[in-house]
Amino acid sequence: MAAIARPRLNAIAGPILGEFLLAMSVAMGGLWLASQTSDAAAGAFGLGTQVLETLFAIFRVLAIGLGVVVTQMLGGGLQAQVRRTSLLALGAGTWAGLLTMAIVLLGDAAILEALNAPDEVQPLAGAFLMLLAPTLLLDAYNMSMSAILRAHLHVRASLMVMVCMHSTHLALAVPLMLGLGPWEGLGLYGYPVAMAVSRLLALFLHLWLWRRRMNLRPTLRDWWAVPLPVLAPVLRIGLPGAAVEVAYRIGFMVSLAAAARLGVAALATQSYTLQVLKYVALVSIAIGWACEIMVGRLVGAGELTSADRLVRKGVRNGLLASGGLALMVAIGAPWLMRAFTRDPAIIAAATTLLWLSLLLETGRVFNLVLNGALRATGDATYPAASGMGSMLLVLGLGSYFMGRWFGLPGIWIAYAADEWVRGLLLLWRWHGRGWLAHARETQRRVRG
């Protein structure tokens, strides 16, 4: 209980930050390797990874729900229930992985048509998706098993698995894509082959850590069984989060279309700026996940005052870290952008956007920290219901009209306004103690 009463937020957030940084860097490396093959290969890589990112929403339903429910049960000391819920990650992962595989294998042509894939990209992207399909099953297992490890506070062990997985992926991708000696390599298709090997390695490492750290030894039945009474609380937490992600993606796609109307230079500027901001947001994402893990444990243990203090600390740390990092990026924008382009007009436009991103990133802190904290208390519906309207109206329609009137700066203002509207609604919910009734109901359910 001492560890629950005095949670070390930064000790948890640090390894999580490392995980996200590794994943993002490998994706960037894969894009660069694909670009060395051809522009069409780079385009196919981009389309394929976007499809995977969309389908990962199904896995996040499980990972989010499993992580929150397990942390609550651990806080309540319910080891038998923790074991049953943890093993659900395997059975549910099997069916979720098979579902996404079927979507890719049977619907690849329809997916590429919906994405308006150019004619020269379609054959490459179709084969690329076919090879990526088996990795979806492995990712379904790994995402959920990693969430279980983090819920048990084995964040360093989870990070080590990710280091091994991503290092193996990148180390194999280089020779498989670019060739070795006289062998010319597989080109674009070397990436999914390396990915499958790295995901298999991660699965074996997760199983080893489950046995060693948590004494979880899955049986054959655990790989396909999905007990509905165990699944229900996981879905109750995970499904609202998935609805939020769908709404966000709709709004964001509208903003991409609004930028595309402004021309190739504007689209390139937006792409480069968003790529830089992904790294800025990592700190807030890591703090938000760490808060979610610890708040779930504190709520399960009945330490609601400690949970409140932890969340306030998380918001403060996030504002200081993300705000400071966004300021540094804005100051260094004229030099950072030269890594992507030498066009002075694009560099100037991106610099303006990165200064506006000070508003965007500070508003994002409230969403990333408070959303996970509210979900961990059991208050999962309010963050989804309060945010979806803003995502569709402020982010979606707002970026469309603001883009027509003010160009890219207008779209960025819409981004920032959406983050602040949703963030202030979540802040009001937390400070207004609207989550307390849900936290107490979670305690009763855990103890019952």
Image: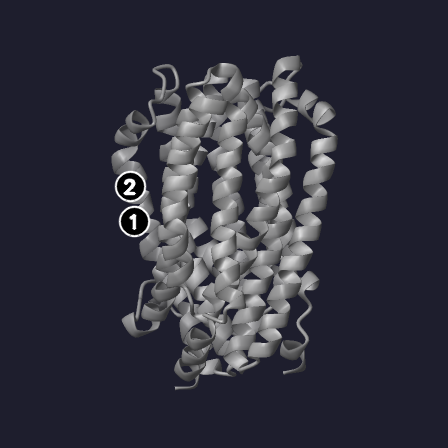
> Can residue 218 be spotted in the picture?
no
Q: Position of residue 438 (x, y in %)?
A: 42, 74
**Residue occupying the point 41% across, 19% down:** 261
**Which numbered tag is attached to residue 103?**
2
Q: Is residue 391 above or below residue 36?
A: below
**Given the image, on which type of amino acid does mark 2 rest?**
Ile
Q: Position of residue 90 (x, y in %)?
A: 40, 62
**Residue occupying the point 29% across, 28% down:** 114
Q: How would you rate the neighbour count of disc 2 (Cα within 10 Å): few for under 14, some for 14-19, many for 20 or more?
A: some
Element under label 2?
A: helix
**Residue occupying the point 26% across, 30% down:** 110
How many marks can you see? 2
**Given the image, on which type of amino acid does mark 1 rest?**
Leu
Is 143 displayed left or right of 102 in the figure? right
Residue corresponding to mark 1: 99
Q: Is residue 192 above or below residue 403?
A: below
- Disc 1/disc 2 C-alpha distance (Å): 6 Å
Q: Is residue 392 above or below residue 342?
A: below
> Can residue 280 be spotted in the picture?
yes
Q: How would you rate the neighbour count of disc 1 (Cα within 10 Å): few for under 14, some for 14-19, many for 20 or more?
A: some
Q: Quadrant of the N terminus?
A: bottom right
Q: 25 or 241: which is nearer to us?
A: 241
Residue 295's image quarter? bottom right
Contact between marks 1 and 2 (CB within 8 A): the answer is: yes
